[in-house]
Amino acid sequence: MMIKKKWIFALVGLMPLAANAQEAVNDATTPLHLLKPAYRYDYGVPDKEDVKASIDRVFDYLNRTTPAELDETGKALKRGDFRLTSYEWGVTYSAMLRASELTVDNRYADYAMKRMDFLATQAPRFIKMKEKGEKIDALMEQVVSPDALDDCGAICCAMLKAKSAKMKGIKDLRLWDEQIARYYDFIANKEYRYSDGQFARLRPVKNTVWLDDMFMGIPALALNGNMDEALRQFRLFHDKMWVADKALYRHGWTPTDSGYHPSFFWGRANGWALLTACELLDISEDDYVMKCFKEHLNGLLALQSADGVWHQLLDRNDTYLETSCTAIYAYCLAHAINKGWIEPEPYVGQTLLAWHYVAAHITSKGQVEGTCVGTGLAFDPAFYAYRPVSNYAAHGYGPVIWAGAEIYRLVDRLCLKTNDSAVHYYPEDPNTDEPIFYVK
């Protein structure tokens, strides 16, 4: 296995600074380009074991705090720190499956399979309770009677992936098929749509299109074999939400007589759009989706901050720096490099920079810091700028695990080294244990 080193260049020891302590340190006496920069976070090529340790902390925390069992009444789910039935946890299940694949750590897949199987096997019990007129646990209401794309899209995706991969942990395939069918039926047949057939919502006003719904609806269509409709929906979203001069997607759209559509480029929503393209490209490398994906990447990379992170409103530096969108972008970049959709150079430097920021915001307890809480849709900047952040915002956990797993794979398979202190990719290992300054 190729060993990769993270070179930390320091002035002392590499070259003599001056003849004595009294001699001036200047350009004539000292190689100033070797001075160590004052980075706020780690910089360079991470060790893959450090990457794994970071997501393991997150895993351990989630494994402790998200039980898959009924409470003492036997009529509700036992509460933990997060909701097993939410779309955020659908994202987490997909991330766990991918992490298990890339790191060959079965604990991740076992986590996802145990909880998805729990939901599928408990559904009949709650359906019977509901048929008897009993009020059932609101978390299981989402499972047995989904009423929004948020209730079903992301978990449906994760279940379809697990079933397709024939993952261990499915106790009764029939119950999984029934649950997938419940979720998919809502996505394909019951979700409200705009007059042109695009997924839309009745809130906050009628015929509002949310960028989030690209991810909440489109991948499930594709994974369940309806790629034509998935691609049609993708084009409809792109037509309404893409702002070409920014190379970004607006968060919300609603029909207006004037044709004026306020554009607020919310970070996480742009993450859902980028992630949707990744999910589609994993199934079929459609030329239109690939073009949109690469254009979106370029728009996002132009706005990455010096610390590797993106702002809550991407183009407004007066809004705070946000972790969940940064994790999604790190995942999508690393995934695109690993899949060969984009070449490693020149993308790898910004990819690793994003990961270093994300890793620095995983606490010793395994919580993710700096994630915006659940967010509706608005047509003014203050709404987004002042949304709270919380370590219990579930939206950060799946993306962080997804990103870490993909970065783990990236640093394991590519020759990544520093050249003049900057991160670069080399098609062939220069086979040297010395610091690389100039490689031809």
Image: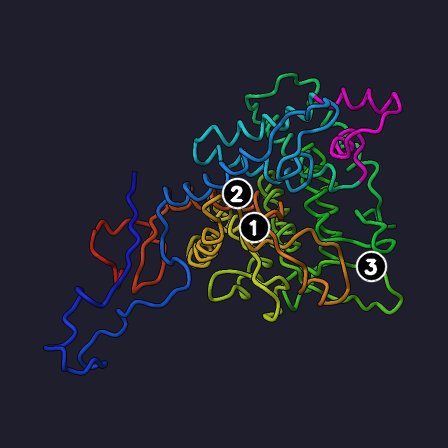
Mark 1 or mark 2, earlier in chain: 1
Amino acid at pointer 1: Ile
Mark 1 residue crowding within 10 angstroms, few (<14) / some (14–19) / many (20+): many
The residue that label 2 is drawn on is 402
**Amino acid on which the number 2 mark rests in the picture:** Trp
- Is residue 421 placed above or below 361 in the rendered structure? below
In the image, residue 301 lies at what x, y percent? 53, 62
* Residue at left offset 61%, top offset 49%: 287
Q: Which residue type carries mark 3?
A: Thr
Tell me the distance, in whole angstroms, between the alpha carbons under discs 3 and 1.
26 Å
Against 113, residue 363 (above or below) is below
The residue positioned farthest toward the left in the image shown:
19
Spot occupied by residue 141 in the image (x, y as percentages of width and height): 78, 32
Q: Where is residue 272 drawn, in percent x and y?
A: 64, 50
**Residue 143 sits inside the magenta stretch:** yes
Residue that label 1 marks: 328
Pointers 3 and 1 in contact (CB under 8 A)? Answer: no
> Start and end of the magenta stretch?
122-147
Helix, strand or loop for disc 1:
helix
Q: Which residue is mark 3?
A: 254
Splitting the image into 4 quarters, where does residue 376 fall? bottom right
Q: Main secondary structure of the magenta part?
A: helix
Judged left or right of residue 269, residue 252 is right
Distance between the Cα atoms at labels 1 and 2? 8 Å
